Image (cartoon, helix red, strand yellow):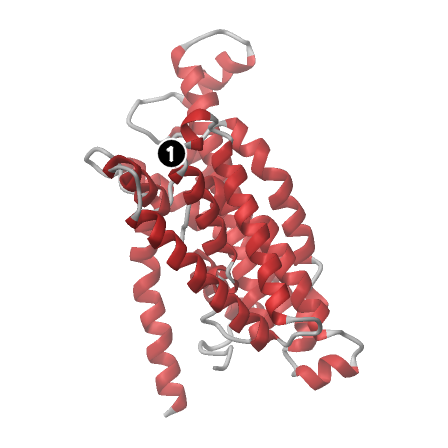
Amino acid sequence: MSMSLAPALPVSRHLLIGGLAVLVGLLFIGSLSAGRAPLALLATLRQVLAQEPSLLGLVLVEIRLPRAVLGLMVGATLGLAGAALQGLTRNPLAEPGLIGVSGSAALGAVGVFYFGLAQAFPPALPLGGMLGAAVGAALVLLLAGRGASPLTLILAGVAVTSLAGALTSLALNLAPSLYAAFEIVFWLMGSLADRSLDHVWMAAPFMVAGWVVLLSLGRPLDALSLGDEAARSLGFDIGRVGVRLVIGTALCVGAAVAVAGAIGFVGLVVPHLLRPLVGHRPSRVLVPSMLGGAALLLAADIVVRLLPGWPELQLGIITALIGAPFFLVLVLRGRRGEA
C-alpha cells in the first residue's frame, strides 16, 4: 500500500517541531493539574521546592508527576516506533505491535501476574515485561534469519505476536482465581494510574536507548523509500537496518508496555497524521512523531481523569476509541486508491 494516502501539505519542520513541543509542554502541565483532587499547581510546586511537607505536595510528586512523565515517554516511544516501522515497511498501517514486541512484553507481565510475583515484589511487573520483550525480539530475529527483508521480519513478528497472544489467553484460561484473571485483563487494557517514580527510573534507560537506535535510522529509511535496490546501491544493508529497528523497538516499546500495559493505535495514528506535513520523508517524521505521540497520550490520559465515574476508564480504551475509526478511514482510502 502506498505511503501517500493523504495530500502533501509540507510546512516548516522546525515550526512543526516547535509547535508540537509547546503543545506537549502545555499538556504536561495540564496532566500535573488534572485530577479529582483540586490542586493549585504553582502554590503546590513552591511548597515542594521549599521542602514544606503537605498532602498536595505528596500528591503532585508521588502520583501526578510519575504519571505525566510516563505519559510523555510512553507516547513518544509509541509515536517514534510507529513512524520507524512504517518507514521500514513503507506501509501506513504498520504499528509497533506488528513485530511481536508488544505482545511479548505483555506476555512477560502476564506471567508475573500469573505466578503471583507482582504482589510479592512490585518491580517484578516491569522487569517481566522487559524480559518478555527481549525474548520476543530475539525470537523474531532468530526466525527471520540473517539479512532478512522487511517482509520476512514482519512475518516473523506476526508469528511471535500470535504465539504470545495464544499464551496470554492460556494464562487467562488457567488463572488460579477470578481475581487474578481480572488483574491480568485490567492491566492489558493499558493505564498510567498508580505508577511511581520507581517505574520511571526503571523504564527510562531502556526507552532512551531505544530512541537513540531508532533516531539513527533516518538516512537508511529515506533510502528504503526509494526501493530495496536503490537502498542497496546507496550502500545500506537492508537486513542490518531491520535488525537495528527490531532492537530499538524492543528496548523502548518493551519498556513502555512493561510499565503502562498494552496501549494501541498511537503508533498508527500519529505518524500518518504528521507525514503529509513533512513531505512524506521518513527521516523527517521521526521527531515530530515522538512529540505527537507524547501529546496524544498526555491528552488521552487527561480525558481519562476528567471523565465522571469511578473507577476511571483504562487509557487503552480511549486510544482505541480514537484509533479504530481512524484505522477504518485508512483502509477505506486504501481501497479507493486501488480502485
Instruction: Name the spot of residue 12 as percent of width and height, x first.
Output: 60, 63
Answer above or below: position of 112 versus 213.
above
Q: Position of residue 81 (x, y in %)?
A: 55, 58
In the foreground, 6 or 122: 122
Asked which secondary structure carries label 1, the reply is loop
> Seen from this angle, which residue lies furthest bottom?
339
Nearer-the-camera pick, 30 or 308: 308
Mark yes or no: residue 5 visible: yes
55 over 306 or under it: above or below: above
Name, please, the residue furthest toward the top. Answer: 52
Q: Which residue is mark 1?
A: 193
Nearer-the-camera pick, 298 or 310: 310
What amino acid is labelled 1 in the image? Ala
Instruction: Judge the density around disc 1: few (<14), some (14-19), many (≥20) Cα neighbours within 10 Å.
Output: some
Q: Residue at x 34, y 42 (%)?
A: 184
- At x 31% / y 50%, what residue is drawn? 318
Is residue 265 visible in this depiction of the protein? no
Name the quadrant containing residue 332.
bottom left
Residue at the extreme left: 309
Give the x, y percent position of residue 123.
Answer: 51, 30
Q: How many marks?
A: 1
Q: Does residue 310 appear to the left or right of 227 in the view shown?
A: left
331, 177: nearer the viewer: 177
Q: Quadrant of the C terminus?
A: bottom left
Residue at 49% of width from left, 49% of height from top? 105
Drawn side of residue 120 relative to residue 247, left or right: left
In the image, residue 166 sits, relative to residue 306, either above or below, namely below
Q: Position of residue 145 (x, y in %)?
A: 66, 71
The structure residue drawn at horizontal position 31% and vertical position 46%, both measured from the top left corner, is 174
Image: 297 above or below 329 = above
